Image (cartoon, helix red, strand yellow):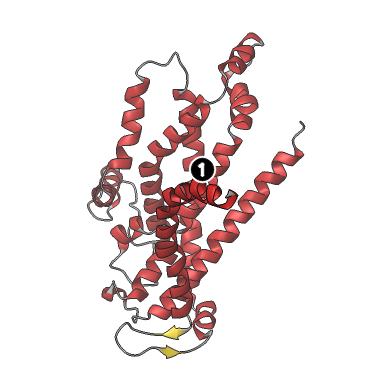
Amino acid sequence: MRVRRWTRTTIPYYLSVSPFFVMFAVFGIFPLFVAGYLSLHRWDGLAPMRYVGFDQFTRLADDPEFWHALLTTLEIFAMSQVPLAVAALSAAFLLSNQRLRLRGLYQTIYFLPQVTSIVVIAIVFASIFGNNYGLINRTLGWLHLPTLDWMTSTWGVNTVIALMIIWRGFGYLVLFFMAGMAAIPPELYEAADLDGARPARQLWSITLPMMRPTIVFAMLTGIVGGMQVFTEPQVLVGSLGTNSPGVTMMLLQYDYIGQNPVAGAETDLGYASAIGWAVFVVVALASLASWAATRATSEKEPN
């Protein structure tokens, strides 16, 4: 009787959340097993699979193209995510000021790039940073200053991609941080004002400690997204070769899937799966390192 009552009261709740777990199993867990199986084979998608064991991972470790893509990914991540987080947090703190006029207008303007097509953004940035007819190089030419190789040099392409990521993600992160700041009790700031604390001191002593969970979540999602950057380089430099500037790990995987014949990469779904597992390991290690560093910092702070 008790089992029947438990079944009658609990099964509807499990059924109500079951679609999420079914979808996660089909589109999240199952592809991991498929990718693991493919990484042990060499397959172009048409001919029969050929089992090669762990040769794909050995090839990955000795492949200069992969290490070039990994270094490019890390450079773009460092150039985009760190300045993005600092700028967004500072802007969110300024916009949270209740005395600021037209705050809603600023929020709308900041968020507009988030809903803008990435293709349009790439066209705009290519027009600004073009080598021959870009706005910046034309301006430098008018000023009789040397022009810069934005779209052909490694540092130039990585800088443009990082600026695209910053410009597009700035508004979303500002609103995200503002939502976290809204949960801070205003009495803390009122007491700080009475004690004569300046805005910078309030940011360091009140806002940052109270927003630690929000900052950690934003940092972890930034690592996951930053290490898997694909759209920006694919739209901007996707037609170049695998050793070209701006080729990230995800773009290299895309090339070996066979979606970019101009890149010169031979289609190999097994090697593409091995690259995917390498991306997973890099993201997991970076997330664990970030979480451990944040936890160690919080433990050192006095209670």
Q: Secondary structure at mark 1?
A: helix
Q: Look at 45% across and 15% down and name the residue there.
A: 98
Residue 121 place in picture, x, y as percent: 27, 47
Where does label 1 land, which residue? 218
Q: Is residue 263 left or right of residue 303?
A: left
Residue 29 place in picture, x, y as percent: 47, 65
> Which picture quadrant has residue 112?
top left
Q: Image height check: is 300 above or below 105? A: below
Few, some or many residues within 10 Å of mark 1 (<14, 14–19, 20+): some
Residue 96 place in picture, x, y as percent: 47, 22
Q: Nearer the viewer, residue 141 or 110?
A: 110
- Quadrant showing the C terminus: top right
Q: Nearer the viewer, residue 68 or 297?
A: 297
From this viewpoint, which residue is outermost toward the front? 1
Residue 149 visible in the snapshot:
no
Q: Nearer the viewer, residue 252 or 272?
A: 272
Residue 146 place in picture, x, y as percent: 34, 51
Residue 227 visible in the snapshot:
yes
Q: Look at 49% across and 78% down and name the residue there.
A: 63
Number of residue marks: 1
Q: Image height check: is 97 above or below 34? A: above
Q: Look at 61% across and 30% down and name the residue there.
A: 210
Q: Image height check: is 34 above or below 137? A: below
> Which picture quadrant has residue 19?
bottom left
Q: Image height check: is 36 above or below 156? A: below
Mark 1: amino acid: Ala
From this viewpoint, which residue is outermost toward the top? 194
